[in-house]
Structure formats: structure tokens, C-alpha cells
Image (spheres, rainbow, N blue to C red):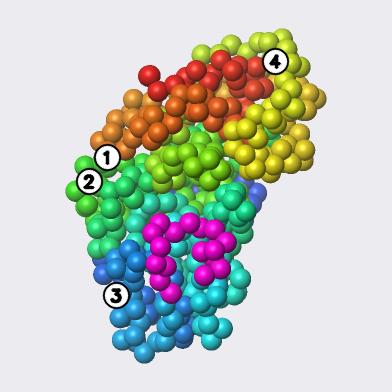
Amino acid sequence: MDMLELVKKFNIETSLKLSNECSCGKEHTSDVKEVLIEQGALVKVPGIIKKYGGSKVFIIADRNTYNAAGKDVCKFIQNENLSYLLYIYDNDPIKPDELAVGKAIIHYDSECDFILGVGSGTINDIGKIVAHITGLPYMIVATAPSMDGYASVTSSVIRDGIKISVDSACPTAIVADLDTLCHAPLYLLQAGIGDMLAKYISICEWKLSHIITGEYYCENIATIVRIAVKKCLNTKALLNRDPEAMKSLTEGLIISGIAMSFAGISRPASGMEHYFSHLWDMRALEFNTPSTLHGIQCGVGTLLCLRIYKFISGITPDRQKALNFVNSFSIQDWNQFLVSFIGKAAEGLIELEKIEGKYDSESHAKRLDIIIARWDEILNIILEELPSLEQVEKYMSEIGMPTRPKKMGYSDAEVEATFLATKDIRNKYVGSRLLWDLGFLDEAKAVCRSDW
């Protein structure tokens, strides 16, 4: 079966077979060898452990995830005469920082030959780090369809008070028992939906960056993500805890992680909407400002991005305006703003710019030439890739998600400043960078206010 045919028929099973060379010129691979999403899946966990060479398992869970699935997993493992060592975090919520990772490591026994996480975001991030350090195979037993990191090769952690992504192991197997997922709290479902809605922005920006900066892009991977998003959008069924709807959402989240592995970058699943969330997390760590689950923040960030791209669609590029804006831009003043807005995390962003050079006038001039020459194409991508604001807002409202930053405790001034800072979070071309290139960044921030 060739790549195009696999994409057309794409699902979890075919995703693990996409190792042949794609028309984009890359070979797409993932270290995930097995994904099981079904009712009663927990009973099959011991067989999967044995299949991949496990005989003594180090299990990581928290109190909630142990009660949700860990207790049964331990029972089934014991029934199959496998040994295990269990570590349960006693604090709730767990911060994915040095202390949490260190607790897992210090409770690990070198006689263990398999790592198993029972949980979702933070437990999975820690489990992948432990597997990376020990070099052992890793399985995650999902307890909620709450995020897209199940199949990724990185972990989001707090290091020295700053939230970063670090290299970690990719799960060998992912198991999701629909009986467990259907009982997950609503706010975790909302987080998963927010993380999936974000893909509209990420795919759009990936295509735009391909045109403007020449960044690598794969249409087959983008198509896979689009298919995954469409399968998730059944509000009524999710609210009714329909197993098939829950399966579709979980598949979409896992496929998004696999897509990142295929691409070798986070582009297929993360764009400017994620940077709103990252910045709110940074401020929470530094200044104890409000924050909530990453996926819920990404959902609100997606709505903000849709408003921003609607603004972009109404722009007529003006070369002189863009050049005047860039010539008046002060990197010193900007760096001072970053320090005041996010504190010590600004140091990393300032150092990143020294390497990246996005504010360099010559680099800007080259991008501006491309933007002006291909403006109609840019507008067509925005039109084709992005749904309407009203459509996404309606969907989020139906499932009970917040649709305004002020509902999460953010003032208009804070959201405007967050938008300005999104262009500095990663070495990635996003909407705020396009607006900086065009000289419309300051005008655009007004659309981030909550009064729409």
C-alpha cells in the first residue's frame, strides 16, 4: 500500500505502517509499535508487557489515576505472575518539575525492565523521562482524552521555574480502556478538544511558513491531522460519554502525536495558539497569575488566533509601512518588555533571538518580498484552512468550555501583551511574526480583547 492510499484510509492501525518514503522526500516513522483503544483494554496490559520483554514493571500513577485504572492494572499484572513496583504520587495536582521527576527516579528499582505510566499529561511526561533515562520500553495506560502528547518524543516539564520541552522516550505501546475514558472528568475532555481544535491553526501556519520561509512541509501529514480533527467534533456524543465518540477523540490526540513524530517537528500540532498557553503558564510560574489545563488554554488561544487571522485577511500589504515599522523597532526595549512580562523565562527567549535573528533587517526584507509577491496565495490558505470563529466558538460553548480569556482570569491588557510575545516563544513562523513583518502588529492586538 503506497503513502497516498494509506493517508486516504488513515487510522491508528495504518499510522503505524507509514514508514515508506513519502512524496515530501522524507521517511515517516514512529517508535509507537502498538495502540489499543477498546472497552476492557486493561485486561490486555500484562500480555503487551510480556510481548515487549517485560517481567518486572515499574508503575507510576497518582491517586486519581490509580483509582481510575491503576488498581485494576496492578491486579491484572499480578494475576499473570508478573512482578511490579508501584509508585503513587500523593500530591494533587502534580507539577512536572525536578522534584516530581526526581521522586519517580529515586523510587525506581534497577531490577525493573519495563516502565508503565497510568494517567495522562503529567504522568505520561514523567514516565517518558524515566524510560529515556533507563533505556527501558515504556507503556502509557491513558486515563483521559486530555492532550496530544501520548505518542510524542518530548516531555513538557518545569526546569528552574521555566516550562520547557525536553527529549524523552516515545511509548512502545499506548493502551486506552474506553470504560475508563468514559468516566473521565468533563474538564479533561474539554482539554482534549481544545488541543484538537488547535490543529486548525497549526496546519494553516505550517503551510504559511512553508511559503514565506521555505520551511519543510508535508501535505500527507497535514491531511492526516485534518482527518483526525474532523473525527472528534461530535459534541452531543462526547457529553453523553458515547464510547465511539470517546474513541475518536482519543485516536485524534494520539494521531496528532504520531504526526509530530512523522514530521520530526511539532508543526503539525502546535502553532501560535499553543504559545498563548505557554506564556500564561510562564506567567503563572513567575507571578502566580491564573492558569488552567493546557488544552483549555489552547482552545481559547485558537479563538484568539481565528480573530487575528480574520484581521490579517483584511490587510493590504504596504512595503513602506512595513519597513518603517521594522526600522523603528527597538530590540532593547522589546527585551525589557519580555523581562517585565514573563520574568526569568525571558532570558531563554532573548538568547533564542540571538541565534534566530528574526528581527534582522535583511532577513525581514527577504520575507517581505515573498509575502507581497504571494499575498493572494497566503489569503487563500487562510480561507481554506481555517473554520469560522462562530463555528469553533459554538462547539466550545456546547461542551462547556470557556470562550473568552477573561473567563480564565486574564485582563485585556494581559492578553494583548501575551499576543505580542507569541512571536518569541519558539523558532517558528506564526501569525504574530507575519504581522510584525507587515508592520501591523500593534494594530492587531486590539482584536484580542474580550468584547467580541
What is the x, y in percent for residue 438? 64, 18
Q: Residue at x 47, y 19 (%)?
A: 447
State which quadrant residue 48 falls in. bottom left
- Give amino acid for label 4: Phe
Q: Mark 1 and mark 2 in contact? Answer it, CB < 8 Å.
A: yes
Residue underneath mark 2: 239
Mark 4: secondary structure: helix
In the picture shown, does residue 448 fall above or below 55? Answer: above
| Farthest-out residue, right | 362
Residue 447 numbered mark, or none: none
Mark 4 to mark 2 CA distance (whole Å): 48 Å
* Distance between the alpha carbons at the discs numbered 1 and 3: 30 Å
Type of amino acid under label 3:
Asp
Q: Which residue is mark 4?
A: 325
The mark that comes first in sequence, 4 or 1, is: 4
Tell me the magenta residue range.
Answer: 87-103
| Quarter location, residue 31 | bottom right
| Numbered circle sitting on residue 72 | 3
